[in-house]
Amino acid sequence: MAAQPDVLVVGAGFAGMYAVYRFRKLGLQVRVLEAGSDVGGTWYWNRYPGARCDVPSLEYSYGFSPELEQEWDWPEVFSAQPDILRYANHVADRFDLRRDIQFNTRVTAAAYDDEANLWHLETRAGEAFSAPYCVMATGCLSVPIKPDLTGAESFTGTVLHTGLWPKEEVDLEGKTVGIIGTGSSGVQAIPELAKLAKSLHVFQRTPVYTVPANRKTMREAVQQEFKDNYRSIRDMQQNNAGGVSNFRPQRSVKKPTPISFRAADNNIKPLSEQERRARVVQRGLGELLAFSDVYTDSEANEIANELFREGVHHLVRDSSTAQALCPTDYGLGCKRQVLDRDYYDTFNRDNVNLVDLQATPLETITPTGISTDARHYDLDVLIYATGFDAMTGALLKANVTGRGGQPLKDKWNYGPVTYLGLQMRGFPNLFTVTGPGSPSVLCNMIIAIEQHINWIGDCITYLREHGIRTIEPKEHSESTWIEHVNEVAQGTMFTSPNCNSWYLGANIPGKPRIFMPYVGGYPRYRDRCEHEAARDYEGFELDRSA
Ligand code: NA7
């Protein structure tokens, strides 16, 4: 039997992988338990056609190893899933991470044992693991959900979920495919599925605001300029609200960098109608995202929404399809921005049909397809692009129980309560990575992950060096932090009353409506974490009775 590790880590996505590297450097014995058969997390599971990251790859990459930065080449500016997974595998090989990771191992329970001061983890296969510290690197979008649709089990064709896409190639040639869901995953998949399938029915409940993604291949000179400036780029990331440097190559660009329209004074309201339209015509729908007041002023927001709808009508030939694709009951900036490749143009194809579920509601899944109140659609393949139980789902699914057997689901009955998205009172020595109450999904995830793992590693080292038995947040720290997290989200489009996003848990019936990530910006958040470490974790209760 293997020796008891110092730290158990759940998940071998980018967080769990970096935890192995970092904790080893700190002299800790680490054991990672991962449900999948290999590394990569999100990028392991989300293999659907069209899956792609919405952060440039030179930024969405580890910064802990200058050698890694220099040796890795990205083929595109915004990478597709296979390239990101290839990178994850390279990192795992290069740093020999897999020897501390046990794959095909789903954690089904994590319980704190007060007396022994240990975390006991159980797996689906009945294995048991224990360690003094436990890190839940379980991801923010890792529990795919399917809506509870009548007859769903009766469908006899192939059923797929974008978030659980098979490793084996899915042959769609000659098939009639139906896809439910037009969030980020659906929008990315639909143009690719349309090319592969005989015909595609898109079942849409809520239309989306999506703008064209940057689809540039990487130019060698641009990549080299990034590589030459990586140290200052990493510093810039640390000081940017979203953890991106926005570094603009000077040497390798042929013409001078265009003047940024993202300046704080770049508002849509003061512009004339003609000027607004000219900007959109010249620069595309994405230009609407560059106006500052769109995110803070509901009038400005509606001006942009209307221009967006106009744009959709220009892009989609059939006017009733265009009309159905126009969002009307919520505004830009409420949900995570979706980026696409040819989404609207896909609806101009003869083999693609939009089914507007607001006009013709979905009634039942049948053995052969989907019935709406207007007609039946025969399908060979049914794809769910219906999202995730975001941010809290994976933590709750792991059946975490803290001091005195308190279930995490009870503590979070009215929404997630954490201090800094790193720890929960009543759950000593348990750490979460990019958890609710931290910048998390509002930040470049790799930057957020590295900061959390560094903080957790340093914290565990401190506890061990000072003979401290346990750490958990003080009650006051936790409650004031949650108040602050809520306060900074108020007044933003994220929390406007007509906004229903997964950030708010609104995609899950019965889930408390709380804005889960910290919107106050990564640098402000990081300062707070550093402040805690520098002041001997004064916001935490430390049990020195060891
Ligand atoms: P999202 O963004 O949660 O989108 C899920 C989609 O599924 C959305 O269009 C939903 O419509 C639709 N949905 C959910 N339930 C139903 C039912 N019952 N009927 C019809 N349509 C339904 O998930 P994604 O996977 O696309 O993206 C999640 C994040 O992953 C994304 O933001 C990126 O950060 C990566 P609704 O809007 O609820 O009406």
Image (spheres, grey):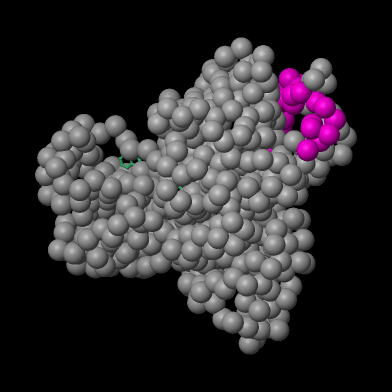
- Tell me which corner region of the image, top left, top right, bottom left or bottom right, holds residue 460: top right
Membership of 487 in magenta stretch: yes
Position of the N terminus, as image quadrant, is top right
Residue at the (57%, 15%) spot, across then down: 406
Q: Residue furthest front?
A: 1
Q: Residue 287: x, y in percent?
A: 55, 65
- For residue 217, above or below residue 381: below
Q: Nearer the viewer, residue 207 or 87?
A: 87
State the extent of the magenta-drawn residues as a range. 461-488
Q: Quadrant of ligand 1?
A: top left
Q: Residue 156: x, y in percent?
A: 14, 42
Q: Residue 232: x, y in percent?
A: 77, 67
Residue at the (12%, 49%) spot, across then down: 378
383 horizontally vs 517: left or right: left
Residue at the (34%, 55%) spot, across then down: 167
Q: Nearer the viewer, residue 30 or 145?
A: 30
